[in-house]
Amino acid sequence: MAAGKASLVAHGLHLCVKNKLLLNSTFPDIVSCIKRGLATGVLSQTVEVPSATTSPKSSFGGPLEHYNSLIRDGQLREDLQQRAALEKLDQMQKDLRGYSNKNSTLFSKFFSKRKPPKGYYIYGDVGTGKTMVMDMFYDHVETVKKKRVHFHGFMLDVHKRIHRLKQSLPKRKVGKMAKAYDPIAPVAEEISEEACLLCFDEFQVTDIADAMILKQLFENLFLNGVVVVATSNRPPDDLYKNGLQRVNFVPFIAVLKEYCQTLRLDSGIDYRRRNCPAAGKLFYLSSEPDVDATLDKLFDEMAFKQNDITRPRSLKVHGRILTLAKACGTIADCTFEELCDRPVGASDYLEISAVFDTVFIRNIPLLTLNKKTQARRFITLIDALYEHKVRVVLLAEAPLDDLFVHEHQDHHDHHDTHVLLDDLGISRDAGSSLAIFTGEEEVFAFQRTVSRLTEMQTEEYWVAGDRSSK
């Protein structure tokens, strides 16, 4: 660890840990996190990913060469499935040299455009290094028209663009029918002008509003020459599994398979759960004696180093105010109820991730099927915090692996479910298999949450999340 830190200082860099397989906490070939963004919405916000080749000093010809170097230096552990994926991505990186999805001249419209290479959809179990190989590929692609973003954030941006375009339409005159307007194609064209390569982390579909527009959106992106690389925990055929109106979503899977090759990366090892030095005690049980006083003291010790006073904090999110009861500088002290038991969502969590580098989350309850909505918010919250390397201190009712309890719903919840099914015109037999009611999607996604929270307690992660030197 000391040698790693000395190397870090010597290069004047701050490690942005995205590599799930690092055996040491730092290595000199990774340069500082860089800011990447598009012109609007979430994609214009800072997206931090490790950059190994955007620096002109990089000596690596591609992701596979970089990977081999890390193996030789003992900083990574050889993984044959990762190597196989990187061999494919390394070739794609070469195929993308000089590629553009834009007609550069008037005369080029009369000639056939260069055909884009097929993208990749990389899936496998949690913690196997999917994000690492994608980011290593991304860093070595030699084009400025590339964007790497969490899929949830991308879809938030898409919906904001749709809303903006609809708001820009002329007002309908009284007594006249409004003309039908489809904003999906113009939105896809906007995005295509900003990027010829899109890399998505955590490609998952849980929202019906997303599910209904994906086919048309991605069909237009692909026709506009956009190349897509994505990571996911699910194979393509299982996307939006048992989702509401899934029959309307299924055609998207065929589009995805047509333009993206499928790669399975699943060595059966969750590298986030490897034995790494802990950053101290960051996970507490509510049954521990004087635990609230212990967390109060820990917060006060951190707050003492901030150039601020402890006070409520108001954040502006899309024109509305999100208030947190207790914060000091870049540290927020929150409760589960404050973050997950009121109508907040991904955009709120992204703003919290941008403002704070450390978040206390107290009083996390057992997440039963009766708390599916809160569980979804918690999963989204941890995804956002992890993506932005925000450090967490947790106080929960049970250990991480026991937090989500997949049990039968109580009588009251069954009644609410039946009322909703009746309102939607869905039979109870048909509704019994829908993921929105069974909690299947939450159980699946929570495996990723536990894996990420395990890594978030390591010293490696804690050091990477320190923004004081930035």
Image (cartoon, rainbow, N blue to C red):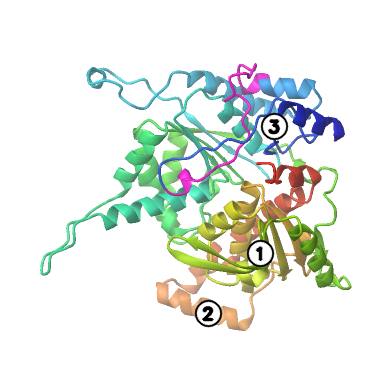
Name which quarter of the figure residue 366 lies in: bottom right
For label 1, the SS is: strand
The residues tagged by marks 2 and 1 sit, at their Cα atoms, a distance apart of: 37 Å
Tag shown at residue 327: 1
- Above or below, comparing residue 4 to residue 467 in the picture: above
129 or 310: nearer the viewer: 310
Q: Position of residue 347 (x, y in %)?
A: 51, 57
| Residue 279 in sight | yes
CB under 8 Å between discs 2 and 1: no
> Dot 3: what SS?
loop
Instruction: Find disc 2 in the rendering and name its residue.
Output: 416
Instruction: Tell me how far mark 2 sits from mark 3, CA to CA.
Output: 54 Å
Residue topped by disc 3: 13
Choose the circle earlier in sequence order: 1 or 3. 3
Give the quarter of the figure containing the C terminus. top right
Measured from the top left, where is residue 409 in percent x and y? 64, 75
Q: Which residues are magenta?
A: 41-65
Q: Nearer the viewer, mark 2 or mark 1?
A: 1
